[in-house]
Image (tube, rainbow, N blue to C red):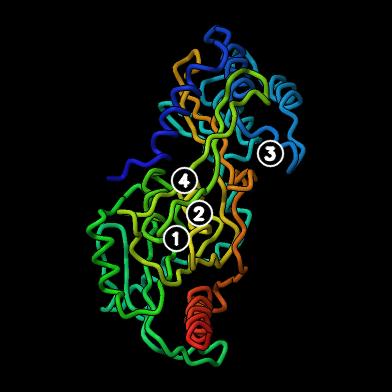
């Protein structure tokens, strides 16, 4: 059964977030009325002002003045949408969206401003990886055994078989039975590489359930707060989030390496945060994209929907995870690797590291 403390806490937070914030003032369904409603809904309910102010000096009051000057009563709906979308993108938060019948705004700077360190096209065409007849798939998970091979770039022979899973979409969950079958397939492997690069999120409850297979003890992975009033600092006390071991024992208590890049967002960001506290786990790649605020939706006077982050998440040391999680080891890959050695160097680095970990463990 997948209902754990996180699911209960998340439900409570969601209900309290909607009910606890002050009643927003009513505005007319005019360009100026919709602008003021949009700005105030963010001002009263958004949860990450402190993070944004600290990171890049966001001043929401100044933002109001800048964008109010662009509002005209004669402007079209599309013109109004563009102004509001530009204002919302000042928050640098992909969980903040304006949804109209003709367009949805979406902030993309969390990954477009960085190197991808990942190419699904390369991996899907490479017979070394996903195009291999040995690469299998169940649900949204691709998986295969990376057998002993030669690392061309670093002139190293990889001696052991290593399990590899690519999971690119948390909106497509897999069953416990499917996961167990993958682990059984990997039973002779020295470890598992879990690749979540390019996974922009989805089902947050599953993102907290999957780590339960990799621990044999209840583990605190973070905290969550919810808004209690209109002030930028009006929050509840932090509520603990834990991962309970699956069936009390977990399922895979051997080395795990998780591969990340900037497109790991929202539920995937939460997954990486959970996994870094699981035993025998190492995070390799680039900092995740973030997205640590639980979103809900409000409505503007003209019927457009405003989606915004309202409940901030923290790691277990109470550091906000809104802006991403740094890997244990930074590793990059890209076009030079794909064309030159025809390998994904992040995967190959993880394979080599897994081999060294295994050798060191057998020598102890």
Q: Earlier in the sequence, mark 1 or mark 4?
A: 1
Residue located 65% across and 45% down the image: 319
Residue located 56% across and 72% down the image: 333
Q: Position of residue 90 (x, y in %)?
A: 66, 35
Q: Earlier in the sequence, mark 4 or mark 3?
A: 3
Q: Position of residue 118 (x, y in %)?
A: 50, 66
Q: Secondary structure at mark 3?
A: helix
Residue located 62% across and 47% down the image: 323
Q: Secondary structure at mark 2?
A: loop
The residue carrying pointer 4 sits among few (fewer than 14), some (14 to 19) or many (20 or more) residues within 10 Å by Cα, namely some
Report how far apart the C-alphas of labels 4 and 3 lie in the structure: 24 Å
Q: Residue 283's quadrant in the figure?
A: bottom right
- 4 vs 2, front mark: 4
Q: Position of residue 285 (x, y in %)?
A: 56, 66
Q: Earlier in the sequence, mark 3 or mark 1?
A: 3
- Please report contact status of discs 4 and 2: CB closer than 8 Å, yes or no: no
Label 2 belongs to which residue? 264
The residue carrying pointer 2 sits among few (fewer than 14), some (14 to 19) or many (20 or more) residues within 10 Å by Cα, namely many
Report how far apart the C-alphas of labels 2 and 3 lie in the structure: 19 Å
Residue 196 marker:
1
Label 4 belongs to which residue? 242
Q: On the picture, is 63 further left or further right than 218?
A: right
Report how far apart the C-alphas of labels 3 and 1 lie in the structure: 25 Å
Report how far apart the C-alphas of labels 4 and 2 lie in the structure: 21 Å
Label 3 belongs to which residue? 51
The residue carrying pointer 3 sits among few (fewer than 14), some (14 to 19) or many (20 or more) residues within 10 Å by Cα, namely some
User: Where 285 sits versus 210, above or below?
Assistant: below
Q: Secondary structure at mark 4?
A: strand
């Amino acid at each position: 059964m997948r209902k754990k403390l996180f699911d209960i806490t998340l439900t409570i937070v969601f209900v309290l977030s909607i009910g606890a914030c002050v009643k927003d003032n009513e505005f007319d369904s005019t360009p100026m009325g919709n602008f003021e409603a949009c700005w105030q809904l963010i001002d009263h309910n958004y949860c990450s002002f402190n993070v944004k102010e600290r990171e890049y000096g966001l001043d929401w009051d100044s933002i109001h003045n800048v964008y109010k000057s662009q509002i005209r009563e004669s402007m079209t709906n599309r013109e109004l949408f563009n102004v509001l979308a530009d204002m919302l993108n000042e928050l640098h938060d992909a969980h903040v969206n304006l949804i109209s019948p003709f367009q949805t705004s979406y902030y993309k700077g969390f990954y477009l401003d960085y190197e991808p360190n990942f190419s699904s096209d390369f991996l899907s065409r490479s017979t070394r990886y996903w195009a291999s007849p040995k690469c299998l798939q169940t649900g949204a998970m691709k998986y295969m055994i990376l057998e002993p091979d030669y690392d061309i770039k670093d002139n190293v022979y990889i001696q052991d078989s290593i399990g590899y899973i690519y999971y690119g979409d948390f909106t497509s969950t897999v069953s416990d039975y499917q996961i167990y079958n993958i682990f059984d397939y990997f039973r002779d492997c020295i470890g598992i590489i879990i690749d979540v690069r390019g996974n922009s999120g989805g089902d947050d409850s599953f993102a907290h359930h999957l780590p339960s297979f990799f621990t044999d003890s209840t583990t605190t992975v973070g905290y969550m707060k919810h808004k209690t009033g209109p002030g930028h600092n009006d929050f509840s006390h932090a509520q603990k989030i834990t991962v309970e071991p699956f069936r009390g024992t977990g399922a895979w208590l051997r080395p795990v390496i998780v591969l990340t890049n900037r497109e790991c967002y929202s539920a995937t960001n939460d997954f990486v945060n959970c996994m870094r506290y699981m035993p025998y786990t190492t995070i390799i790649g680039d900092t995740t994209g973030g997205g640590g605020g639980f979103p809900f939706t409000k409505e503007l006077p003209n019927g457009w929907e405003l989606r915004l982050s309202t409940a901030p998440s923290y790691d277990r040391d109470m550091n906000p995870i809104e802006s991403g999680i740094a890997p244990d080891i930074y590793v990059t890959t890209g076009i030079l690797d794909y064309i030159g050695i025809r390998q994904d160097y992040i995967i190959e680095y993880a394979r080599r590291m897994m081999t060294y970990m295994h050798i060191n463990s057998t020598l102890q």
